[in-house]
Amino acid sequence: MAKRVLPKGECTLLLPTRQVKKELLAREDRMKGTGKKPVKKHGDASSMAVPDSGQSSLPSVLLGDIRSLIESARVRVAVGVNAEMVMLYWDIGDRIRKEILGDKRAVYGKQVVNTLSDDLVTRYGPGFARTNLFNMIRFAEVFPDRSIVHSLSGQLSWTHFRNIIYVEDPLAREFYTGMCRLERWSVRILQAKIQGMLFERTALSKKPEELARKDLTALRDEDCMTPDLVFKSPYFLEFLGLSDTFSEKDLENSILRELERFILELGTDFSFVARQKRISVDSEDYYIDLLFYHRKLRRLVAIDLKLGKFKAADKGQMELYLRWLDKYDRQPGEEQPIGLILCTGSSAGHIELLELEASSIRVAEYLTELPPRNVLEQKLKAAVAIARERLAARVAGQ
């Protein structure tokens, strides 16, 4: 029952709620029939309607500007909160780490963390659980320079760091940190890159540590990208769905059909330019399978697709493509074009004798079916070790 209280001297009317609504609707219908508008009396349910926001008299420009200010402020607040949280977690991890190292007893360290966690969780919530405290300690261990953490705190979230700190290889950690910052990877993309062993597939991982560190330092301090950071081997092309037997044309068609995913596997900042780019030399036509442009490298990237292993003749063909592009297609401000030969096998001996590592040509394998992770991991680690030994020997000889 709906009860309406009236001023003293008037009667009190008790009606069921449905009946009130029914009578109001009936009155409006009668008014519509006579062409008159219903008179809104004080206390009527119809008089409580909220004005339509679509009929607001506010200028659209003013409303848009204010909304932009609010959204920008929200972003700045979120970034600021994230940065403060990252620095807080580093400070906590560093302080606990110093306490544990000062005593130098593993059992004592566990007791400290357990006791501290119990107190902090009671006071501040589950964010300070035992597992997260150990994450903070690890954070301070692998990122000992507070100034570097501070510079990264506005760009990488705590979840980013939590994935990076458990990458064992220090060079790989620095690689993922730098690339994640520069290319603005989401946490999901970062996890996929680590799971896909991106660092182990880059040319950078195959360089001696001191040379690789120079590239990583330039990446961190100057945002400087090098081909060794961009190109990798093997490339995972399992998403193309190719059968056991296929032609180079099938491979090219599949790549163009799945172009977006192919570019994601190549890496960010690649832009598609042309397919079967025709070049003419002495009235003879040649065709570059795929032509891309890399924004950070500021270079054209010619890609030649091969079904078999790399052959010496493939180098001569790519050199012709690159010299033509350099002479006729290179724009002012661009670096010299670079070539990528994608093969089913890399032929390490040929690549070493032809000294392709020092040239503008890269050779990489591609896989249309992914092997088990443990097999892939063993293969990549062996390739990295062999390449580093060869390069170190060459540098020592020079």
Image: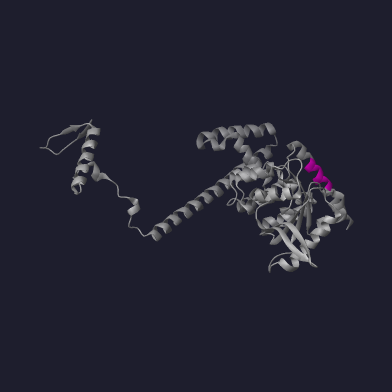
Q: Which residues are magenta?
A: 379-386
User: Residue 176, position in %: x, y?
Assistant: 68, 48
Compared to 241, does 66 lie above or below? Answer: below
Report the coloring of the rendering: one colour
Residue 64 seen in the figure = yes
Residue with the most extreme front position:
283
Residue 345 placement, left or right of 290: right
Tell me if residue 283 comes above or below residue 91 in the rendering.
Answer: below
Q: Observer-nearest residue: 281 or 100?
A: 281
Examine the rendering and report whether any part of residue 98 can be seen.
Answer: no
Give the quarter of the image for residue 49: top left
Taking the magenta stretch, the answer to whether it contains residue 172 is no
Relative placement, left or right, of 36 versus 371 is left
Q: Outermost residue, right direction?
A: 397
Quick check: 15 left or right of 325? left
Above or below: residue 229 compared with residue 328: above
Inspect the magenta stretch and tell me whether residue 384 lies in it. yes
Residue 349's spot in the image, x, y percent? Answer: 87, 50
82 vs 358, nearest the viewer:
358
Q: Residue 202's spot in the image, x, y percent?
A: 74, 49
At 51% from the left and 53% from the top, the residue drawn is: 76
Q: In the figure, residue 163 lies in which quadrant?
A: top right
Where residue 243 appears, x then y in whole percent?
73, 41
For the N terminus, the quadrant is top left
